[in-house]
Amino acid sequence: MAVKEPEALKMKRSIGLIGGVALVSGTMIGSGIFMSPQFVLAYVGSPGASLVIWALSGLVAIFAALSYAELGTVISESGGDFIYILRIYGSCPAFFAAVTFILVVKPFGIAAMAISIAEYVLALFYTGCPPPHFLVKCAAAVAILVVATVNILNVQIAVRIQVVFLVAKVLALALIAIGGIVELIQGSSLIVDNLNVENAFKGTQWSLSTLGMAFYQGLWSYAGWYNLNCVTEELKRPEVNLPRAVVIAISLVTGLYLLVNVSYLTVMTPTELMSSNAVAVTWGNKVLGRWGWIMSVAAALSAFGSLNGTFFSGGRVCFVAAREGHMPDILAMAHIHRLTPSPALIFTTIVSLLVLIPGDFQSIVNYFSFTAWFFYGTTLSGLLYLKIKKPELHRPYRVPIIVPILVLIAAVFLVLAPIIDNPQIEYLYVTLFIVSGAIVYIPFIHYKLCPGLLTKLTVFLQLFLEVAPAEKNL
């Protein structure tokens, strides 16, 4: 009798259309819409211009997501930007993308969301003043550890949490939108003052730097449009569900965001909105009175769901980069029973906690956006290359070539505008950090040097964490 070979260890395709919509929209609707409106308004200087920024941010997000959907059906592997850059441009550019997303973009995003969770939870107890900085950081660290534990233990639970929290988020945003409509019916004059022809664009700041920073904050609220591309190997029928999920999710989110921002302007003057530490709480106190605390809870739950989605996809980028030989081998392994990439998730947790220590919400978002849009632009240029040079590739889904061209122009603007108009030393630090990856790439990736100590550590961690190498699920 023939001996049956053991089945290869693979990640399961456990995400359907509903799960995909929940992962994209559930990650997008997070801390941004509750934290960024005051920063967008502060940068552009007028209510009308801020609404234009929110609408254009949604348009950029949906165009970018549709472009990535085509890439995801041509290169049907998990890993998002890293795997696309690797397959199109080769190992060296892909390594710099991996380092950036694993050590900068994903941890910065996780830290920013965790801070927003902490601020909204603590706002319940510190009604007259901002909470202590140290306490905010401790609460944010707890949020990161809770989400990490859930994602390490079970994929299905993480996806279900995403669906449940998406429902809670949509209800919270619907409450804000309906509250604004009720205020309008009751004769609120603020919206007329804020958005009439004379005042809507009064005081708008048109400099490249302020517009770039405003887009950073606006697009931060749409961050998550790319998440399904990081988990393509776990998505059922990706050629169908990937484009459908992003269109449904981003259309829903853009509509809600515009309604919510109008609702904010219905009950708050621009000055009140810009001076608010937690704009949703300020709105809740004005509209809901003694029930205003509900908005703190809703905002915290919303950010928690977004944090869960970011963690879910962020760990997969680290996992795929290691599988392709661009990170230590231990990070390419999955738990033998739970089938989760637990070493990669643990590593992402550690880096996120380190990023959390020195950062604040606004600066974290700006550096996140600067680095992320550089590589989004690189990926989109790769899509244009495939469209022009390799039109024969099988494409279950395709977008008109003008769509990635427009997003690439937006990406170039977002990277260069703040630097040209208002250069800051911090952008140089981020750039030098990315370039310093060459110190690691040349000996360990290009020449494949592997210290004996690293091999022994890999074996020890493999036994301790009960993990094994996982194959691609194509």
Image (tube, rainbow, N blue to C red):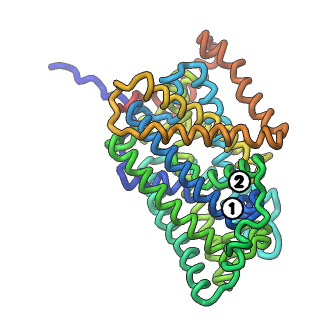
- Answer with left or right where residue 394 lies relative to residue 21: left
Q: Quadrant of the C terminus?
A: top left
Q: How many marks?
A: 2
Q: Choose between 440 and 410: the one closer to the eye.
A: 410
Badge nearest the viewer, 1 or 2: 1
Task: Check contact, mark 1 vs mark 2: CB within 8 A.
Answer: yes
Q: Is residue 354 above or below residue 221?
A: above
* Closest to the observer, 149 or 288: 288
| Crowd rating for badge 2 (residues with CA inside 10 Å; few <14, some 14–19, many 20+) | many
Vertical relation: 196 (above or below) 169:
below
Badge 1 or badge 2: first in the primary sequence: 1
Residue 190 point in image, percent of width and height = 70, 80
Residue 49, numbered label: 1
**Residue lying furthest bottom in this view?**
186
Say above or below: 346 vs 296.
above
Coordinates of residue 337 in the picture (x, y in percent): 41, 39
> For the residue labelled by badge 1, is the local secondary structure a helix, a strand or a loop?
helix
Tell me the tag on residue 214.
2
Tell me if residue 282 can be seen: yes
Q: Quadrant of residue 124?
A: bottom right
